[in-house]
Amino acid sequence: MNNTPQKHKTLKRVIISLVIFLISFSLLSVIVSMCVFSVMFGRYDEKENPLFYSYSDIDSSKYPRTKKVFKSGENKLCGYYYTTSRDSIGTVIVINGYHCTSDRHLSEIMYFVDNNWSVFTFDGTGVGQSDGDSQIGLAQSRLDTAAAVEYVGSLSSKPVVLYGHSEGAYAAVTSLNDSDRVSAVVSVSGFNSPLELMHRHTKNHIGFLADIEYPFMYAHNYVLLGENSNTQAYEAINSTDTPVAVFQGKNDTTVPYDISIYSHRDELRNPNAACFEVGSSRGNHSTIWLSDSAAEYTMKYRQNPFKNPDKKKANELDGEFMEYVLKFYGAAIK
């Protein structure tokens, strides 16, 4: 008895089932990827943090600022321009990290102003007072930074330098591909690749499923941001001879060593790039610019929040670090 027709029917059913499974799995994966982006990059409106300075905490007569509006793509972004009482050296553009608004680095902003630099900082797309239904993706910060550099360049012909933290550190470095207007970059706690960081944090939540979802996250990221979606930071540093200082904390768990810009230090070919690893209590993701005592105070609060933290104690700067930043900028513009 010839059972070939039966075998063909069975094979056909297997193939159809496999195709249905692959289509269903792909659709589900696309939905999961969209959900991940929606959760990670939904709109972030300003929330007061009891540990950080807000503009109402500082002397506005000593640190006056002017609200500025500029465009990044189709969105209008809100920025603030801080001026000095004397003729400024140039402008430091301060670029904030993920889920941070323009007041986040007020300690450094005041320090720069005290040392005769103007400062420009801004809320990114989908953040704070800026337009946007979402933050789109990590690489959007690069596009926003490039727009900010162009805008500041239209306000003054003086030197422009960048100071970025975390997502802002990545943006500061990769925006070097977009403009030759920048004289120097300080990158603090920056990641090398948006997708590497997304994959790592997704894996922390859903385990091995993140590996399965990676191709769909990659595709979704590319659809949203195109060729700018996953620029490697170390390659951007190598594309120029602009001075870049990279700082990484030994104890950073938000941007761990192996996915940081710092981990590619041996691959840097930019003759004016310098890399530094920071240990002790300052070696965490958001404490490198703080004094040891402020870093310890901050970590104590984060581990066990208490009422009415002392903002002055929590935001005291590390003098050696900040002095290095000023000297680095000064040497670059000479």
Image (tube, rainbow, N blue to C red):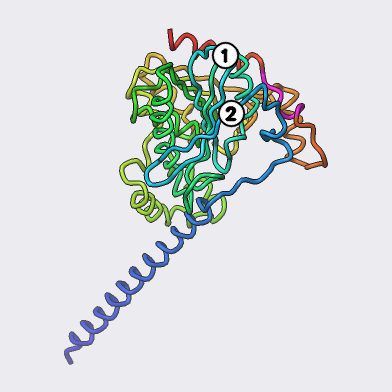
| Label 1 packing within 10 angstroms: few (<14), some (14-19), many (20+) | some
| Label 2 packing within 10 angstroms: few (<14), some (14-19), many (20+) | some
Q: On residue 85, which mark appears?
A: none
Q: Residue furthest right?
A: 307
Give the quarter of the image for residue 293: top right
Counting the numbered discs, the total is 2
Residue 111 lies, with reference to residue 65, above or below; the image says above
Residue type at tag 1:
Asn
Residue type at tag 2:
Arg
Quickly name the residue at label 1: 116
Percent x, y of residue 223: 34, 52
Residue 297 lies, with reference to residue 72, above or below; the image says above
Percent x, y of residue 148: 43, 32
Judge by depth and name the residue closer to the eye, 14 or 260. Answer: 260
Residue at 43% of width from left, 25% of height from top?
Answer: 155
Residue 36 lies, with reference to residue 236, above or below; the image says below
Q: Nearer the viewer, mark 2 or mark 1?
A: 2
Secondary element at tag 1: loop
Q: Is residue 260 left or right of residue 269?
A: right
Judge by depth and name the residue closer to the eye, 233 or 333. Answer: 333
In reply to whether residue 316 is colored magenta, the answer given is yes
Q: Is residue 16 left or right of residue 325?
A: left
Looking at the rendering, the stretch of residues picked out in magenta corresponds to: 312-318
Quickly name the residue at label 2: 65
